[in-house]
Image (cartoon, rainbow, N blue to C red):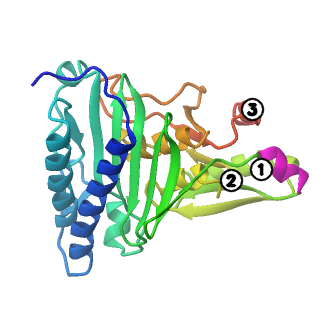
Amino acid sequence: MNQATSTPVSQDLVDQVVSLTHDAGKAILDIYQQDFDVEQKSDDSPVTAADLAAHKILVAGLRGMTPQIPVLSEEEEMPSFAERGSWGVYWLIDPLDGTKEFINRNGEFTVNVALIENGEPVLGVVYVPVKEVTYAGSKRLGAKKIVAGESKSIRVRSLSERQQQQLPVELVASRRHGAEAVEQLMAKLQPLFSSVETKDMGSSLKLCLVAEGEADLYPRLALTSEWDTAAAQAVVEAAGGTVVDVDFNLLRYNTKDDILNPFFYVIGDTDFDWRSILEA
């Protein structure tokens, strides 16, 4: 296979990926509405028939669309870094992000597809099958949210406006990880805003809330993998936000042997001086 070193992100490509995530979502919901078994992978994380069904649809679809671009999926054996380190462009997918949310039947799980170019997520689609909501973004084309076939542009919100209007700053947090660190961060923010509120959410939806201006910050001070974040990071950046590690370096992909992310912050308003607060 002759691998691509770059690929133009067109609206047609975005639309094809959106359609593909919807196909995967239908397969997931078919299983979600039945009784299903839960198995454990070698890393003790859960996997279901829905993860595998979505994986097959996405991989076949992406390889059919772009045969010259490799696909890296959570549900497939990962190539060595010696091999994937040579990829200038590749698809990075999580066929069912939030398997624990799927098992608990709370609806907060997503289908994630990202196109990575030289370590940067340049296109991302996050689909929420239960709600039939899609987030899609690329820096060139901007970010959008699609609900019931209706598409609208989304943008991160201004924190200075919230301060002027004496509105709360809102953090989005994981239900399962990092509660103590979030409480410490809230204490730092309390003097600057009328109040500090949190929203609990599962899967990559946490990043999407920041992208659409429904939250201001998502501090992730616990481990994640690259396929958990790449698609939603592309949406956040297309909406005007940023995703940085705790040293304020941009989160990048496929740069090392393992596929774990560092701890990170998803920031909406990049004009706000988050650095002085978060590094304090």
The residue where tag 2 is placed is 183
- Amino acid tagged 2: Glu
Counting residues from the start of the chain, the first of labels 2 and 3 encountered is: 2
The range drawn in magenta is 159-165
Residue 193 painted magenta: no
Q: What is the CA distance from the residue labelled 2 to the residue labelled 3?
A: 15 Å
Q: From the viewer's perspective, is residue 165 above or below residue 9?
A: below
Residue at the (9%, 25%) spot, across then down? 1
The answer to whether any part of residue 203 appears in the image is yes
Give the amino acid type for the residue marked by disc 3 in the picture. Ala
145 or 248: nearer the eye? 145
Q: Position of residue 247 (x, y in %)?
A: 59, 26
Pointer 1: residues within 10 angstroms few (<14), some, or many (20+)?
few
Residue on which the image places disc 1:
187
Where 88 falls versus 217 (above or below)?
above
Q: Which residue is mark 3?
A: 280
Q: On the picture, is 255 further left or further right than 152?
A: left
How far apart marks 1 and 2 lie (CA) works out to 6 Å
Name the secondary structure under disc 1. helix
Label 3 neighbour load within 10 Å: few <14, some 14-19, many 20+:
few
Which residue sits at x=55%, y=24%?
Answer: 249
Q: CA distance from mark 3 to mark 1?
A: 12 Å
Q: Residue at x 31, y 23 (%)?
A: 6
Q: Are marks 2 and 3 in contact (CB under 8 Å)?
A: no
Q: Main secondary structure of the magenta part?
A: helix
| Number of numbered discs visible in the structure rendering | 3
Residue type at mark 1 is: Ala
Q: Earlier in the sequence, mark 3 or mark 1?
A: 1
Q: Are marks 1 and 2 in contact (CB under 8 Å)?
A: yes
